[in-house]
């Protein structure tokens, strides 16, 4: 039997993230974790380092050919990542 002040686990976690101001870091971690899933195994295997700082996604890619291909579709990648995150997590991608 539910009491009037009970809430679902999802609501409790969402409230906790907003109270402790962790929503931004939580979303950034999600984007980093879903990079290989969104980009595929070929690019995911050639990515050696990925991190976010000041709404910029930094990605180190071993292959210069893949790096040039990704530079061409940079805006599409940003849109895909932000759609999956559910908010605007990144504004720019920098390939290292």
Image (spheres, grey):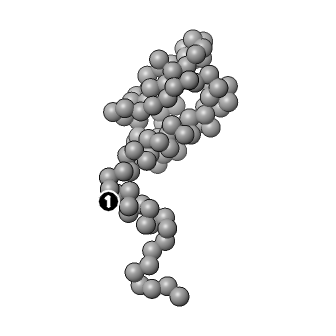
Q: Could you tell me residue 88's position as x and y percent?
A: 40, 42
Q: Could you tell me residue 74's position as x and y percent?
A: 49, 25
> Which element carries disc 1, helix, strand or loop?
helix
Tell me the residue at 41%/33% (across/down).
52
Q: Is residue 94 above or below residue 12?
A: above
Label 1 crowd (10 A; few <14 / some 14-19 / many >=20):
few
Q: How many marks?
A: 1
Tell me the residue at 45%/31% (across/down).
51
Tell me which corner region of the image, top left, top right, bottom left or bottom right, holds residue 65. top right
For residue 74, side relative to residue 44 (left or right) = left
Q: Could you tell me residue 39's position as x and y percent?
A: 61, 31
Q: Which residue is nearer to you in this view: 85 or 4?
A: 4
Q: Residue furthest right?
A: 41
Q: Residue furthest top?
A: 64
Q: Is residue 38 above or below residue 5?
A: above
Determine if residue 9 is in view: yes
Tell me the residue at 33%/33% (across/down).
54
Q: Is residue 61 above or below residue 34?
A: above
Tell me which corner region of the image, top left, top right, bottom left or bottom right, holds residue 48. top right
Q: Is residue 55 above or below residue 18?
A: above
Q: Residue furthest bottom?
A: 1
Tell me the residue at 67%/30% (across/down).
41
Q: Which residue is mark 1?
A: 19
Q: Could you tell me residue 89's position as x and y percent?
A: 41, 40
Determine if residue 83 is in view: no
């Amino acid at each position: 039997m539910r009491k009037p002040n009970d809430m679902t686990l999802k609501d409790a976690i969402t409230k906790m993230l907003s109270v402790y101001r962790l929503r931004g870091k939580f979303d950034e971690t999600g984007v980093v974790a879903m990079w290989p899933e969104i980009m595929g195994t070929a690019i995911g295997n050639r990515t050696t380092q990925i991190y976010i700082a000041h709404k910029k996604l930094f990605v180190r890619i071993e292959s210069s050919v893949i790096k040039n291909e990704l530079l061409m579709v940079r805006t599409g990648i940003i849109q895909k990542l932000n759609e999956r995150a559910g908010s605007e997590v990144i504004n720019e991608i920098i390939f290292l």
